[in-house]
Amino acid sequence: MPSVRNIQNVPPARNASPARNVPAGGGLAGAVAAEWAKLWSLRTPYVCLLAGTLLTVVFTFYYGSIARINDKPVQPLGNAPVSSVMLVQFVIVVLAMLMVTSEYGTGSIRTSLLWVPVRHRVQLAKSLVAAGVSFAAGVLYTVLGMAVAWIPFRGHASFDASEAAAQTLAVGVYCALTAVLTVGAAFALRTAAGTLSAVFVVLSVLPSMCTALGGPFLLAVNEYLPQTSGGHFMLGSGSGPHPPSVGLLIVVAWTAATHLAGRFVLRRRDA
């Protein structure tokens, strides 16, 4: 019979190392892949993107026709799809919002947080997926809007390749930031009605009220709202009181503030 001392000195088997059998986990890349798969397993993104396509076609054709009928001065062709973003952005809002609120509504957010225990990683993964899809959608909508608007403009629009490319990228960036802003608001409010109402007020109601009521103070406030600043950024230089880069920074600031608000609520409140 072997002694206890000899048994203790027996080296462990090669495959018995616990470090080699512990799963590494997916990290942020795995969380992003999971959110991507969940997004395209639903009908919502397809319906939203199709609705955005239809809205872009109708609005840009109308925009070009009105410019021709009213004999407006010649303007960049990209102004038509940029103007349509003020309406199409709410398709992006609905798509990004439902990535969060649908899980809170069904309770599946608990499963998501069990799969990815680092809570902010869940929010970041949803934001990255929503931003990527929204950027691509914004770029495609802009290209489509230019192609549609060119016909009814009939000489009332100019086309410069570099300017068109800049406006196309600007629309994509604005749509991506709007999606991240919406994801942050959705994590903070957790309901579809509350999120949609809050984002709609910030993006549309407040600019309309400030413009309608007028006055130096309200008009100055309007220039620092995300939709107004984003419009200056997308239209390019000479469209507002500050350069396009400042307009971009204002939208980024709104997006960051909303994202941090969503992160704060997610860390303080249980799912």
Image: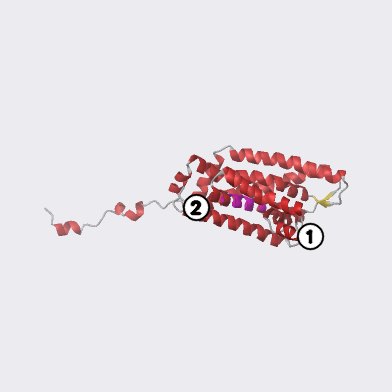
Three-letter residue code for mark 2: Leu
Question: On the rendered structure, is 89 left or right of 117?
Answer: right
**Mark 2 and mark 1: Cα distance apart in space:** 41 Å
**Measured from the top left, where is residue 66 in percent x and y?**
83, 44
- Decide which of tag 2 and tag 1 comes sooner along the chain: 1
Circle 2 residue = 266
Question: Nearest the camera: 167 or 103?
Answer: 103
Image location (x, y in percent) of residue 233: 72, 57
Q: How is the image coloured?
A: secondary structure
Q: Amino acid at mark 1?
A: Gly
Few, some or many residues within 10 Å of mark 2 (<14, 14–19, 20+): many
User: Is residue 125 or residue 199 the one in the foreground?
Assistant: 199
Residue stretch in magenta: 174-183
Q: Which residue is mark 1?
A: 238
**Which residue does the image show at 65% across and 49% down from the upper left?**
201
- Residue at 63% x, 40% y: name it: 48
* 176 is within the stretch colored magenta: yes
**In the displayed structure, does residue 126 sit left or right of residue 237?**
left
Q: In front of the other: label 2 or label 1?
A: 2
Crowd tier of the residue under label 1, counting other residues whose Cα lies within 10 Å: few below 14, some 14–19, many 20 or above: few
Q: Is residue 34 magenta?
A: no
